[in-house]
Amino acid sequence: MKAMIGYDLMETIRSTNEWMGATARAMASSPAWGLAPHPMFQMMAAWGRVAERSFSRMVMKPDWGIRAITMEDGTDHLVEEETLLSKPFCDLIHFKVHGRAAAPRRVLVIAPMSGHYATLARSTVTSLIPDCEVYVTDWKNARDIPVSAGRFDVEDFTLYLIDFIRHLGPDINVVAICQPAPLALAATAVIAEETPEAQPRSLVLIGGPIDPDAADTEVTDFGSRVTLGQLEQTVIQRVGFNYAGAGRMVYPGLMQLASFIAMNADKHIKAFQDEIIAEAKGEASDQDRHNIFYDEYLAVMDMTAEFYLSTVERIFQKAEIGRGTFTLRGRPVDPGRITRTAVFTVEGEKDDITAPGQCIAALDLCTALPEDRKASHLEPGAGHYGIFAGKSWRNHIRPILLDFFDKFSAPVSEVQPKTPTRRSRRAA
């Protein structure tokens, strides 16, 4: 039985580092050192500011911060965040734009639940609001959810998506970013089988591991090297006494963050060294590129142990979606049942997390979907983050998606599907 003290120890280490940063900043910034100026004090104060800010962000949920948007005609409109559905592990939120008519395009952004908050997709959401009615899955930190709320694994995640899509109606365009892509495909398949008329208008899968075996990455290699027993022993902890979820088994956000940073340690170390030097020179600011990125990147959330372990086992190790063997509450889920929803996949040429080939595999799984309702895009030179945020997203991918939404904007009354089969890419 895992003790809760391990979780509290991690939090103690984090808070101690935050305190050390604050202490160094306060001490080295004292005016008294002006009597004996020395670069050492500037560097100490700079290190303190960067350390304090970094470690404090690790336990904060970032705010969406979308207060207003400017339309093409130059008018500003206030934006209100409203909750449409609230479930124990996720809220379905809508960004309501005051003073404008409802946008004809309606988009559900399924944010990843892979260690970061949904706000990681803030730039994606912000860029879509001027042209769309935008809805987002705002996943909750597992440490804040009481044990009495029950468990939450990949099947529960899929059921949440089914409820959200059905609630929004068949004219919704679904955009799944990274981790939820395979489960969004599964949710669409379930809806297509149970209530064909409720299928969403389109489904966009961005950098998702539909078939992890299609192209190896460090992530897929890790999934094949370790056993679930090893993961449970090394990374699963019980939430400590300071949170509402005390006693819940989770994969802690702080431990996930250590893994994220270890994947590109040299890059992160250099970024922080450069920021400390910029602080010492007086060239850093709250809104510089480093702080904007790391304020979000360092804000991590806990995942339930069952969700993390079932994701590793069923999505990566067994590749159930790619092999067509995924089940939901004991019932087979067949993407070949999708007959109306237009499916579009987006991949990045230099994506080292979900390599090209993994996401486009979804198109082969949709065996009953007419070819003219399938499309894909490979973004040259883009990495994983770039295909849903940054220059590649803004200049290339976003306009393509808006055109894709418009192409299939008319309701589908009759579609002549191909004969659905259980054939998958692996069997091909």
Image (cartoon, rainbow, N blue to C red):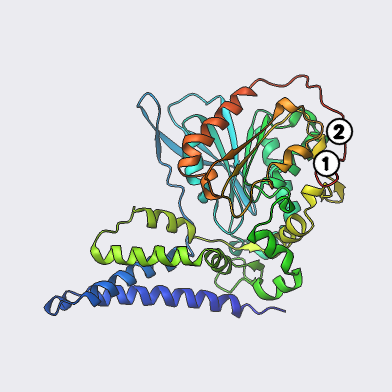
Q: Which residue is mark 1?
A: 334
Which image quarter holds the C terminus?
Answer: top right
Numbered badge on residue 373:
none
Category of crowding for the residue at label 2, using alpha-carbon neighbours closer than 10 angstroms: few (below 14), some (14–19), many (at least 20): some
Q: In the rendered structure, are the residues bearing label 2 and label 1 in contact, judged by CB atoms less than 8 Å apart?
A: yes
Q: In this rendering, would 304 be left or right of 401?
A: right
**Residue 197: x percent and y percent?**
77, 27
Task: Identify residue type, mark 1.
Answer: Asp
Task: Identify residue type, mark 2.
Answer: Pro
Q: Is residue 194 visible to the viewer in this orientation of the structure?
A: no
Tell me: residue 356, above or below residue 340.
Answer: below
Query: Helix, strand or loop at disc 2?
Result: loop
Q: Which residue is mark 2?
A: 420
Image point 76% across, 72% down: which residue? Answer: 229
Residue 341, quarter of the rendered image: top right
Along the viewing direction, whichever of 239 and 212 lies nearer the viewer = 212
Tell me: residue 363, above or below residue 46.
Answer: above
